[in-house]
Image (cartoon, rainbow, N blue to C red):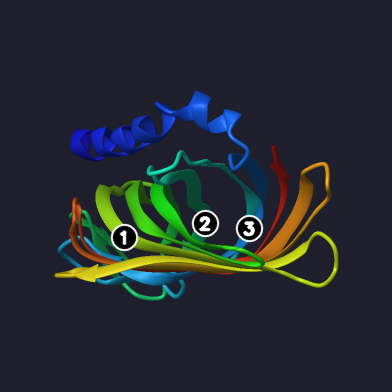
């Protein structure tokens, strides 16, 4: 955990050192954005015992709630641009078990009422270079992604819990093109990695509009897929979070 946080803070620091100089340049950009993501969950996990299905066993379903993130993009000649963002995946659901499951040395029986809390946070720091910067722009770089969260299952007499955290480096690519209508643009962003027992992929496509004063709107679809073995206290986790989103953004 400490190593992951130090690495992410180091990436932030690398970008923040030349911040004053960068913002003084004509090519510097500062973005802020926040909105709502309609998230649908699929996946399964285990902690040395039963494989638990989020949708069938725990009835973890679609959730609509605020999802805020910030992005800072600037550059100094010779140095990479920097982007920072944070997403949260959390849900609190109630279900009645259709089969017996075991989790964290606790046995939950058929027809038992079960409360489940899944809470995951993803913090990204991205270093990238603009490869193209015309009507069509293309950025390539690397992402330092840090995951932390917990899964908790409780009934009237028992409580099972598993905490986890993981530091994942990924490749990053972003493309954007201006459309014929003034201020309208189409874009896509992807990052991912696959090695050993780790697989992570994230993709979103968006349609946006920006007024000349910098205020704009963005709508699109985001998919996050994660598969990890020996994920701290969780022996195995496979998770997909997807759904449409809409955001209000400002370009300084």
Q: Nearer the viewer, mark 3 or mark 1?
A: 1
Q: Which residue is mark 3?
A: 37
In the picture provided, is 46 more to the left or to the right than 15? Answer: left
Q: Secondary structure at mark 1?
A: strand
Q: In x, y percent, where is residue 227?
A: 29, 69
Is mark 1 in CB contact (under 8 Å) with mark 2?
Answer: no
Packing grade of label 3 (10 A; few <14, some 14-19, many >=20) is many
Q: Quadrant of the N terminus?
A: top left
Q: In x, y percent, where is residue 42?
A: 45, 72
Q: Which mark is residue 139?
A: none
Q: Nearer the viewer, mark 1 or mark 2?
A: 1
3D distance between C-alphas at marks 3 and 2: 18 Å
Image quadrant where residue 33 sits:
top right
Packing grade of label 1 (10 A; few <14, some 14-19, many >=20) is many
Q: Residue at x 66, y 45 (%)?
A: 34
Q: Which mark is residue 93?
A: 2
Q: Which residue is mark 1?
A: 170
Front in this rendered view, residue 136 or 208: 136
Q: Earlier in the sequence, mark 1 or mark 2?
A: 2
Image quadrant where residue 196 sits:
bottom left
3D distance between C-alphas at marks 1 and 2: 31 Å
Q: In x, y percent, where is residue 70?
A: 57, 41
Q: Earlier in the sequence, mark 3 or mark 2?
A: 3
Front in this rendered view, residue 21 or 236: 21
Vertical placement of 124 versus 208: above or below?
above
Q: Residue at x 37, y 57 (%)?
A: 141
Q: Secondary structure at mark 2?
A: strand
3D distance between C-alphas at marks 3 and 1: 23 Å
In the picture provided, is 191 more to the left or to the right than 49? Answer: right
């Amino acid at each position: 955990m400490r190593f992951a946080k130090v690495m992410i803070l180091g990436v932030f620091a690398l970008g923040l050192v030349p911040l004053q100089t960068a913002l003084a340049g004509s090519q510097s950009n500062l973005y802020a954005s926040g909105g709502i993501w309609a998230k649908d969950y699929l996946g399964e996990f285990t902690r040395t015992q039963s494989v638990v299905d989020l949708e069938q066993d725990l009835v973890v379903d679609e959730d609509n709630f605020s999802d805020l993130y910030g992005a800072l993009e600037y550059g100094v000649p010779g140095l990479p641009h920097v982007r920072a963002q944070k997403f949260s995946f959390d849900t609190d659901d109630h279900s009645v078990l259709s089969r017996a499951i075991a989790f964290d040395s606790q046995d939950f029986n058929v027809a038992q009422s079960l409360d489940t809390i899944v809470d995951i946070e993803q913090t990204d720091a991205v270093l990238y270079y603009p490869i193209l910067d015309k009507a069509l722009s293309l950025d390539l770089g690397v992402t330092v992604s840090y995951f932390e969260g917990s899964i908790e299952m409780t009934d009237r007499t028992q409580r099972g819990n598993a905490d986890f955290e993981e530091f994942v480096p990924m490749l990053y690519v972003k493309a954007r093109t201006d459309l014929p209508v003034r201020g309208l643009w189409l874009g896509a962003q992807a990052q991912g990695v696959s090695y050993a027992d780790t697989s992570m992929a994230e993709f979103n496509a968006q349609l946006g509009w920006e007024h000349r004063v910098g205020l704009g709107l963005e709508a699109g679809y985001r998919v996050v897929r994660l598969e990890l073995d020996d994920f701290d206290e969780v022996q195995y986790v496979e998770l997909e979070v997807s759904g449409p989103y809409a955001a209000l953004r400002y370009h300084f």
